[in-house]
Image (cartoon, helix red, strand yellow):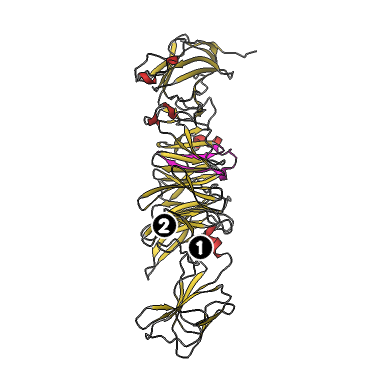
Amino acid sequence: MYSEKKVVSYRNLRGVDFSRSESLVDKNHSPYCLNMMPDSSINPVKRPGWQTKYSLSEEIYNIWFCTIKGKKYMLCHCGDKIYRLGDEAVLLTEGIGKGKGCGFYAISGDKGYFYILTTEELLRFDGEKTERVSDFGYAPLVTIAKGPQGGGESYEDINLLSEVRRESFIGTEEELIYQLGTDNISGVEKVESLQEDGSYTTLTKDTDYTVDDTLGKITFVSAKPTPLSGHDNIIVTYRKKVEGYREQIEKCTISTGFGLGGENRIFLSGNPLCPEKDFWSDVHRPEYFPDLNYAVVGSGQTAVMGYLRLGEYLGIVKESNGQDTSLFLRRAEKKENGDALFTVHSGISGVGAISKNCFAVLGDEPLFLSSRGIFAVANSTITSEKVIANRSYQVDAKLVKEDNLADAVACVWKDFYILSVNGNCYLLDSRQIAPAKSGEKNSRYEAYFWNNVAARSFAVDGDTLWFGTADGHIRFFKNEDIGNECYSDDGAAIYAVWKTAVEDEGCIERFKTLMRKGCLVSLKPFETSSCKVYYSVDGGREQLVSAVLLDITGAFEKVDFSRFTFYTNTNPQELYFNKRQKRYKRIQLIFENDQPDEGFGLMEIVKTYKIIGHSKNRR
């Protein structure tokens, strides 16, 4: 019985599983798989390499792509500067806030702009230049139908982004002094007077009127009765600075679009001065944030971390303190007068977010990073209510131990949610989601692990993934269409490895012998490739057993005669180990590639062995 040959095939190879010990991992998973990802057939292959495109002077906080008037632009926030990136980096503005803010495209009136929150100001990019929104923000008409000495009707709320506001009066034949709605103003911008033909003329300060800024009074040289009965005829535009107003918006760091009938309002939060609040703009007016358009979301003890669109709701995810609600649901409703009403309802207590920059939607699942892993906001299969479910079980054992999780960044690229922290990347594949296994509470995505990707910011342009670094580099992942030059990081080798579980063949009480014949790995063909095979026996050091070039000879001008193989078949290639391993209890097989500009991918592993005598203590 024990002298018969046995054959084990490792098929349907997948990604990494850090959740179990090396001896308990499934045969199609790896306890250590580095710099691999699934190809279109779900086989693990070496990840593409990156190339540096721009080298700037300071940390790259954000990279964005936007389209304005049909033209695409690439922008970045580097240190205290904003650049437009093309053939070269063009400086748009400098002296701005340093820190990771956010950017968003929005319609203002009938035009589209890209807006940037820098942690200190809100900028607007029109395709040519950036401007600080507070320099031209909407001046609301706060009061109408007002008599010279007061009264009137409140019309629009004060704009948090602008010191400028307007008041509209009905003049009389007797009154010369007009009282504004506030004192200690910063000055009058202009005074307009209605004419009989319905037009307005601008009056001249110190000629037609004088101003007492302290008392907030305007004194006219002559009375200004309305020429059209029942119509306001005097409009005063003035400045009034309210300490802390503008900072409520300009220090926000997260944004989203939401509204009644579409994403027609901008919602902002992430302000360290008021972390429990969020704010929303007027309809299609990102330059106007009324001072009453805010909500205190849940407890003041926890900060709003990010937004997720959940059907008709806007999900608001807060940080966790172990007891308060961490997910709130906002709904847009229409009031009787047609205005929008935004109501916030408590959702779920428990898991909260730890990073503001890891919110993304993979397929149809909204994901975020917590201190316990990557979680999705999903529907319960029993009640259809919202639940928060872990999706990164297979990498959590490593991910949650990473330092600086609050600084992690993530995005969705192709079919993957990709998260970077401390130079490491964790990938979840939306094409591979499996039901929960024993010991797991939730279904999970297949996961992969990379290193040497020092991303502090991500941006996606079509199928191209870009990232910025702390030392000012902007890089992109190369496309495999360029050939094997794809497989290097700025020319340097990418170390890729896939290890099997530590296998005892189900009989730890017996020794095994790995046969010289019948052991192989089936490899994906590449123009240039190589593979090294190692054995690790009973916890010992890795022993190199095979190292083979696996190039496909193609066009003559591309041939490297130092590694000429005469191999032209583009089918999978088998590498036979041809090395016997005697008397082991446990064995692990390691497959690696550590050469630049070489592809590498695994399709199947076959192991042939015999079970021999009883194992015993080694001395």
Quarter of the image with the C terminus is top right
Disc 1 on helix, strand or loop? helix
Rendering coords of residue 271 (x, y %): 55, 56
Residue 234 visible? The answer is yes
Measured from the top left, where is residue 373 in percent x and y? Answer: 52, 41
Seen as rendered, the residue at the extreme bottom is 174
* Residue 420 located within the stretch drawn in magenta: yes
The residues colored magenta run 399-422
Q: Which residue is mark 1?
A: 134
The residue under label 1 is which amino acid type?
A: Ser
Q: Position of residue 588 (x, y in %)?
A: 52, 20
Q: Is residue 224 above or below residue 405?
A: below
Q: CA distance from mark 1 to mark 2?
A: 22 Å
Q: Compared to 206, does 260 lie above or below?
A: above
Give the quadrant of residue 332.
bottom left
Helix, strand or loop status at disc 2? strand
Residue drawn where x is 50% and y is 33% of the image:
449
Residue 31 seen from this side: no
Residue closest to the eye, 213 or 496: 213
Amino acid type at circle 2 is Phe
Label disc, if present, on residue 258 of the rendered structure = 2
